[in-house]
């Protein structure tokens, strides 16, 4: 009985971790796209101080998501080796 519960818990936690990792990668890609589009708009000569602030504020969530992405890639590479 204990082995069955442990196995089910391990499988469930692995599935949850995989879906959270995928969500983090999708969020990182979306934030990077928004940052790039905003930077392109600013460089085109548009005087938009709110957009400039928004683009610079995107670094806050991008940095931890990038570290999570690096950790995910490192785990996947170690699984292959």
Image (tube, rainbow, N blue to C red):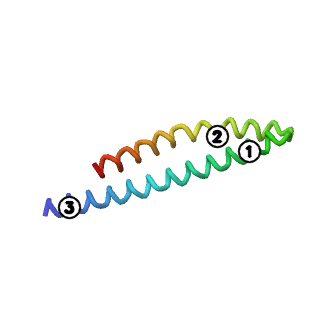
As drawn, 40 above or below 19: above
Residue at the image point whose x is 64% and y is 40% from the top? 58
The residue shown at (57%, 40%) is 61
**Residue at image mark 2:** 58
Q: Do the residues labelled 2 and 3 touch (CB within 8 Å)?
A: no
- Is the Cβ of the residue at disc 2 closer than 8 Å to that at disc 1? yes
Looking at the rendered structure, the secondary structure element under dot 1 is: helix
Circle 1 residue: 38
Q: Where is residue 23 in the image (x, y as percent from the top left)?
A: 49, 55
Which is nearer the eye, 60 or 5? 60
Where does residue 54 sit, x and y in percent of width and height?
71, 40
Give the mark nearer the N terminus: 2 vs 3.
3
Rounded to the nearest whole Å, what is the CA distance between mark 2 and mark 1?
10 Å
For residue 37, above or below residue 2: above
- Total label count? 3
Q: Which of marks 2 and 1 is nearer the N terminus?
A: 1
Query: Residue tagged by mark 3?
Result: 5
């Amino acid at each position: 009985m204990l082995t069955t519960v442990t196995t089910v818990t391990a499988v469930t936690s692995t599935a949850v971790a995989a879906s959270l990792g995928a969500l983090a990668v999708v969020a990182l890609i979306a934030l990077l796209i928004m940052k790039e589009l905003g930077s392109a708009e600013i460089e085109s000569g548009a005087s938009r101080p709110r957009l400039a602030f928004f683009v610079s504020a995107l670094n806050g969530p991008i940095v931890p998501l990038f570290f999570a992405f690096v950790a995910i890639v490192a785990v996947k590479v170690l699984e292959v080796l």
